[in-house]
Image: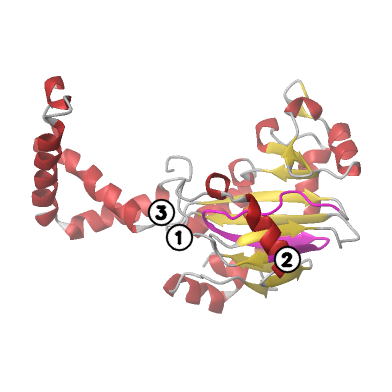
Amino acid sequence: MSLEMLIGADNAAAALQRWPDRPYTVRLPDDSPIARIITPRAVRGFLDAGCGPAGYVHIYHQGAGLHPARFTVDDRVSPASVQLLLDQGCTIQLREMDRWWPPLAAICTAIQTETCCPTYATSFITPPGTQGLDYHWDQNLGIIVQLDGTKTWELWKPRVDSPHRDHAMSTQTWDGEWVKQWREQGPEMEFELQPGDVLVLPRGWVHNPHSRRSTQTSVHMTFVLKERSPVWVAERLVASAVNDSRFRAVIPPADFAPERLPAVIDSVRSLISDYLATLDVDQLAKALRYAGETESSHNIM
Ligand SMILES: [Fe+2]
C-alpha cells in the first residue's frame, strides 16, 4: 500500500516477493500522491525561503562537498548563496527530508510498515549541463523519482557481492582503474529520466548520474530502503538472550587475558547454542516484526 505509490501495484507486489536485483524504470502511477505533494516547487521552496535545516543541506561542486560557510549565515541556509552556487553549476543535496517534511515522513513510515525496511528520502537539484556525484555504488535499494528536468543514469553491474551496511562500501574498496574501464566499455544500462519517471536501482549497481545533456535544472527525490538481512535477524536473536540470566553474569577481568579468552568464547558459544535451541520462535516473531516496522534508519548501522 505504499511502495505502489512509487512503482505501481504490480511492481510493488512483485518486489515484496522477490527483491529487485536488476535496475528498471517505470512511470510514477497517475494516481500517486507523490506527484501531487512532492513537487519540484515544494523542494525548491525550502531553499528559496531559507527553511531547509542547515545540517541537512549539502552542496557539491565537481564531486567535492563545499564547506557550509559558503552557503549558511547564522546556521541558516542563505537563499542568495544557494542561487549563486546553482548558477555556478553546483549540485544541492537536501538530505533525509523525511526528518523535516511531514508528508515525506508519512510516506517513508508507510514504506517501512509495509516492507520492514527503514526508509529515508533525499533530494538532489542539479543545474543543466553539470554533474554532482559521479561513479559509486550504494549499500541499499534506491527508488529515484525524477521531479523536474532530466537526468541520465549510466549503470554497470555490481563489483562486489551484496554490499551491506559498512561492508564493501564503494569508498572503502575503490580501485582507480575501474572508472577507466567503465568509460572504455560504456555503460551496461543507461536511462534518461524524464519528469514522472522512476528508476529502481538495486544496491551495488555502479552509477554515474549526470545532467550534462539536460537543458533545464534537474530535481529528483531518492527513496532509500535499508534492507533487512539475516545478520539483522541474527543480531536480534542474540540480543534477546539478555532475558536469560546466564547471559547477564559477570565475566571477571582476568578472563580477558589472551590465554583465557578462547575458553570464554567457547563457553559463550555453547550458551548461545543452548539458548537458541529452546527459543520460542513464535514469541520472538512478534517482537521481530515490531522491530522491523519501527526501528528507524538511525539506530542501525
Ligand atoms: Fe548513489
Q: In 3D space, how far apart are the residues under numbered discs 3 and 2 (Cα atoms)? A: 44 Å
48 relative to 109, above or below: above
Camera-side residue of 215 and 187: 187
At x 60%, y 56%, the residue is 223
Residue with the mark numbered 2: 184
Camera-side residue of 100 and 241: 241
Residue with the mark numbered 3: 293
Secondary structure found at label 1: loop
Camera-side residue of 184 and 37: 184
- Apparent side of residue 233 relative to residue 172 in the rendered image (left or right): left
Contact (Cβ within 8 Å) of mark 1 with mark 2: no
Secondary structure found at label 3: helix
Q: In 3D space, how far apart are the residues under numbered discs 1 and 3 (Cα atoms)? A: 22 Å
Secondary structure found at label 2: helix
Pointer 1 or 3: first along the chain: 1
At x 45%, y 49%, the residue is 167
Which mark is in front, 3 or 2? 2
Task: State whether label 1 is within 8 Å of ligand 1.
Answer: no
Residue with the mark numbered 1: 162
Give the crowd class for mark 2: few <14, some 14-19, many >=20 residues within 10 Å: few
Which mark is in front, 1 or 3? 1
Which quadrant of the render holds ligand 1? Answer: bottom right
Residue 28 visible in the picture: no
Highlighted range, magenta? 130-154
- Apparent side of residue 192 relative to residue 275 in the rendered image (left or right): right
At x 15%, y 39%, the residue is 265
Q: Is residue 153 magenta?
A: yes
- Apparent side of residue 98 relative to residue 231 in the rendered image (left or right): right
Pointer 3 or 2: first along the chain: 2
Name the kind of residue labelled 1 in the image.
Ser
Name the kind of residue labelled 2 in the image.
Glu
